[in-house]
Image (cartoon, rainbow, N blue to C red):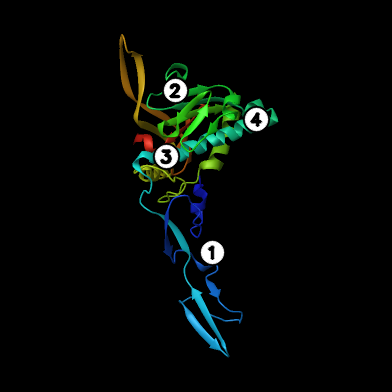
């Protein structure tokens, strides 16, 4: 998938979504605004198209503004609008970290927990996860298609993922190192820019804008309640209860598809656990 970083250059249309070109939104210093069709030296201003003639030559100057990349209204079908590209990018990145740890034999960088959740949130020892592993080798050996991830002998639909819980190493220093890496890799959201999600959902842009503003106005600590994700307790024979599931933590990275937070007060986790949460599955932010 394309990175949100391309949004930082308004003259670049490198995102994977469909874009509408907008003229005159880049300053001349950001691009070469003058194109000349023949060789003679011609001086021209930036006021618009001009023509100059001399001898038998005809010279045409085109002077125009740069091109911004403005996303069109959601282009993917409703069946695909699930922020799946974002979840895939997180898993691919974690796989790259697992490969690095394997090749360098550095246990402090190994993925020691990876749990993928759907609509039932984590219970004791992540029992309710769609798939959970504590093996770095499982992460290394996972593989992907456009629609699923195959890990630990299980194929998981990318569209079914609500959030991913993960950690590396065993110490606070390992977690801090991971936090820095995640921020460097994924913390690139710009308000109003939806680059990076070729398939998203109707509301992810608004959720991202709110998280962006909240982060810089009132701090990075948030409580995120997930949409259609429930915590299960009890059992079907003797009775059970379902409650809305919330994750509490500090924002580490934010882009158009997901937010990554580091846990501060979520049951059955440690402060070294990280959550990559699909923006399409957020119902409330406090």
Mark 4 or mark 1, whichever is nearer to me? 4
Q: Which residue bears the numbered disc 3?
A: 83
Q: Please state the horizontal and vertical placement of residue 220, each as a whole percent of the image.
A: 44, 38
Mark 3 or mark 1, whichever is nearer to me? 3
Assess whether mark 2 and mark 3 are in contact (beta carbons under 8 angstroms): no
Q: Which residue bears the numbered disc 4?
A: 101
Mark 4 is surrounded, within 10 Å at the Cα level, by few (under 14), some (14 to 19) or many (20 or more) other residues, namely many
Mark 2 is surrounded, within 10 Å at the Cα level, by few (under 14), some (14 to 19) or many (20 or more) other residues, namely many
Q: Quadrant of the C terminus?
A: top left
**CA distance separating discs 3 and 2:** 19 Å
Mark 1 is surrounded, within 10 Å at the Cα level, by few (under 14), some (14 to 19) or many (20 or more) other residues, namely few
Mark 4 or mark 3, whichever is nearer to me? 3
Q: Which residue bears the numbered disc 1?
A: 30
Could you tell whether 188 is left or right of 246 in the image?
A: right
In the picture as drawn, the residue positioned furthest to the top comes out as 238
**Residue toward you, 214 or 169:** 169
Q: Please state the horizontal and vertical placement of residue 263, each as a whole percent of the image.
A: 47, 28
Disc nearer the start of the sequence (4/3) = 3
Instruction: Answer with the quarter of the image where residue 224 lies.
Output: top left
Disc nearer the start of the sequence (3/2) = 3
- Residue 239 in sight in this render: yes
Mark 1 or mark 2, whichever is nearer to me? 2
């Amino acid at each position: 998938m394309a990175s949100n970083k391309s949004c930082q250059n308004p003259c670049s249309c490198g995102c994977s979504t469909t874009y509408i070109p907008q003229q005159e939104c880049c300053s001349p210093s950001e691009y070469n605004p003058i194109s000349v069709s023949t060789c003679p030296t011609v001086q021209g201003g930036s006021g618009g198209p001009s023509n100059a003639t001399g001898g038998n030559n005809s010279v045409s100057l085109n002077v125009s503004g740069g091109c911004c990349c403005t996303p069109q209204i959601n282009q993917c079908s409703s069946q695909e609008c699930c922020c799946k590209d974002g979840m895939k990018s997180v898993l691919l990145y974690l796989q790259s970290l697992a490969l690095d740890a394997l090749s360098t034999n550095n246990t402090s960088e190994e993925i020691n927990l990876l749990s993928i959740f759907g609509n039932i949130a984590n219970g004791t020892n992540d029992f309710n996860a769609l798939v959970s592993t504590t093996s770095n080798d499982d992460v290394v050996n996972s593989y992907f298609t456009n629609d699923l991830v195959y890990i630990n002998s299980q194929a998981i639909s990318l569209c079914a993922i609500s959030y991913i819980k993960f950690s590396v190493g065993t110490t606070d220093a390992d977690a801090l190192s991971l936090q820095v890496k995640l921020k460097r890799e994924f913390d690139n959201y710009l308000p109003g820019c939806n680059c990076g999600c070729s398939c998203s959902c109707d509301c992810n842009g608004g959720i991202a804008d709110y998280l962006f503003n909240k982060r810089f106005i009132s701090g990075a600590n948030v409580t995120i309640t997930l949409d259609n994700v429930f915590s299960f307790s009890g059992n079907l024979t003797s009775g059970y209860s379902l409650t809305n599931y919330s994750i509490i933590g500090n924002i580490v990275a934010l882009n158009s598809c997901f937010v990554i937070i580091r846990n501060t007060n979520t049951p059955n986790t440690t402060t070294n656990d990280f959550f990559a949460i699909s923006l399409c599955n957020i119902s409330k932010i406090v």
